[in-house]
Image: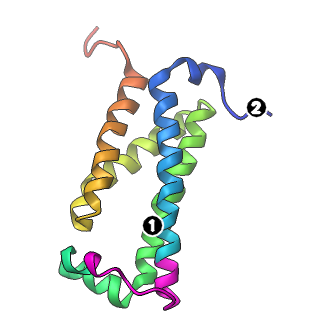
């Protein structure tokens, strides 16, 4: 069974967005590991996370880290699944990527200062996905 559909490779915007999603998801798995180690009390939360975060997020990082782990696992799995869906030329992969990217852009201010990095990746990713799918299609015919 082929891993990717050759038609996706010809659409450079979608192909690059799938690769970025895959790398983004794998990199975000480091957050999952870190949150898991905090939950097990093996590592302390980074002080910089606590000092910059909103009070509600500070409380979650300090006392309910398992919820952060669940958030990270959710977004990580969505990104990796969407990447494979796009590489297999499935429309659901595109929609999953679009939805998870828009949600990321909406919640990134809550996770400052590191949420800014999410925005730097998610905003161009959204453009790549939209241009890759719609390319030269006119708004009205």
Residue at horizontal 51 percent and vertical 82 percent from the top? 37
Residue 7 placement (x, y as % from top left): 60, 19
Residue assigned mark 1: 72
Q: Quadrant of the C terminus?
A: top left
Query: Which image quadrant is residue 133 in?
Result: top left
Q: Circles 2 and 1: CB distance less than 8 Å?
A: no
Say whether disc 2 or disc 1 marks the residue closer to the N-terminus. Answer: 2
Residue 100 placement (x, y as % from top left): 40, 50
Give, as a single range, the part of the protein colored magenta.
35-49
How many residues crowd around disc 1 within 10 Å: few (fewer than 14), some, or many (20 or more)? many
**Left or right side of 9 for 13:** left
Vertical comparison of 24 with 52: above or below: above
Query: Which image quadrant is residue 56 in?
Result: bottom left
Query: Which image quadrant is residue 128 in?
Result: top left
Q: Give the spatial CA distance, label 2 vs label 1.
A: 29 Å
Residue assigned mark 2: 2
The scheme the figure's colours follow is rainbow
Residue 12 placement (x, y as % from top left): 48, 22
Q: Quadrant of the N terminus?
A: top right
- Give the structural element (helix, strand or loop) at label 1: helix
**Left or right side of 40 for 50:** left
Asked if residue 47 lies in the magenta stretch, the reply is yes
């Amino acid at each position: 069974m082929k891993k990717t559909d050759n038609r996706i490779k010809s659409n450079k915007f979608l192909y690059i967005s799938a690769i970025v999603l895959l790398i983004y998801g794998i990199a975000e798995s480091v957050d999952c590991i870190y949150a898991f180690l905090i939950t097990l009390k093996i590592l302390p939360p980074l002080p910089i996370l606590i000092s910059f975060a909103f009070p509600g997020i500070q409380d979650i990082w300090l006392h309910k880290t398992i919820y952060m782990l669940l958030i990270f696992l959710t977004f990580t799995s969505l990104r990796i699944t969407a990447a494979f869906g796009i590489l297999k030329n499935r429309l659901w992969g595109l929609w999953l990527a679009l939805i998870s990217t828009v949600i990321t852009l909406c919640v990134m201010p809550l996770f400052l200062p590191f949420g800014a990095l999410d925005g730097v990746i998610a905003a161009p990713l959204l453009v790549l996905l939209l241009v890759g799918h719609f390319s030269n299609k006119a708004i009205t015919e």
